[in-house]
Image: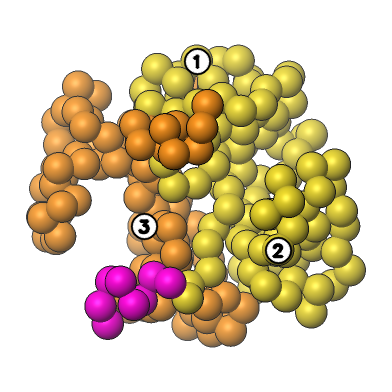
Chain colours: A orange, B yellow
Amino acid sequence: MSKANGEVSFDAIDHVAMPVKNIKEALDWYTKTFKCNIEYQDDTWAFLKFQNIHLALVVPDQHPQHIAFAIEHPEQFGQLKQHRDGTRSVYVNDPAGNSIELMEKASLKSK
Amino acid sequence: MSKANGEVSFDAIDHVAMPVKNIKEALDWYTKTFKCNIEYQDDTWAFLKFQNIHLALVVPDQHPQHIAFAIEHPEQFGQLKQHRDGTRSVYVNDPAGNSIELMEKASLKSK
């Protein structure tokens, strides 16, 4: 499969949310280690822009660790919840119990 | 910052490795739920291609959960190890103890 043909139709991973102990400490390390941009931060989570994806740093008792995929019809997996930024998504678990956010691809364009 | 200018210089996340209990069960779920392509699989791990990133599914006692970043000079963080596919990387921990793989960007082009 050629790269150009193959990539067009695949789903994208919108962001990965990783647990950290302290947001400021984590942001200091991530921004020193990597070329990335802080798009949001407070004491409970932060959102970092990388070239191909966003990385969320989360305090686990405030925000769940998860991976978020952008797909066309997440509503087939459950009732979508609308977030403040206009995106809509539903959380499910994979067979191993990992938390998976299924984001409506069309709602991402409204951001 | 304009999107066109901002994205060029950021580092990329090459892949995310997520723990699962059973590779075949996980592959069945991920390939039914998402448009993606299986690039590798055995009983201990699998590698899935998405539009913007790869997702590794790993049995945790065989392969560590981690996030892999592609950067220009990972050697500043430790001795690089060369893998069978020609890539070179070193594993470090972020301040919260998350396992982070730092891959040499130039070695990815040899794949």
Tell me the residue that label 2 is attached to: B106
> Mark 3 belongs to which amino acid?
His
B15 part of magenta stretch: no
Position of residue B98 measured from the top left corner of the image (x, y, whole percent): 64, 60
Position of A61 with respect to A106 (left or right) is: right
Tell me the residue that label 3 is attached to: A63
| Marks 1 and 2, how far apart at CA | 33 Å
Question: Which chain does the numbered disc 2 sit on?
Answer: B
Q: Nearer the viewer, residue A62 or B25?
A: B25
Position of B38 with respect to A84 (left or right) is: right
Marks 3 & 1 on one chain = no
Tell me the residue that label 1 is attached to: B28
Position of residue A70 measured from the top left corner of the image (x, y, whole percent): 29, 41
Position of A57 with respect to A70 (left or right) is: right
Query: Based on the displayed image, in which of its 4 quarters is residue B56 positioned?
Result: top right
Q: Residue at x 37, y 42 (%)?
A: A12
Q: Nearer the viewer, mark 3 or mark 1?
A: 1
Mark 3: secondary structure: loop
Residue interval drawn in magenta: B1-8
Q: Is residue B20 visible?
A: no
Question: Which chain does the numbered disc 3 sit on?
Answer: A
Query: Based on the displayed image, in which of its 4 quarters is residue B93 positioned?
Result: bottom right
Q: For the image shown, how many numbered marks are present on the structure?
A: 3
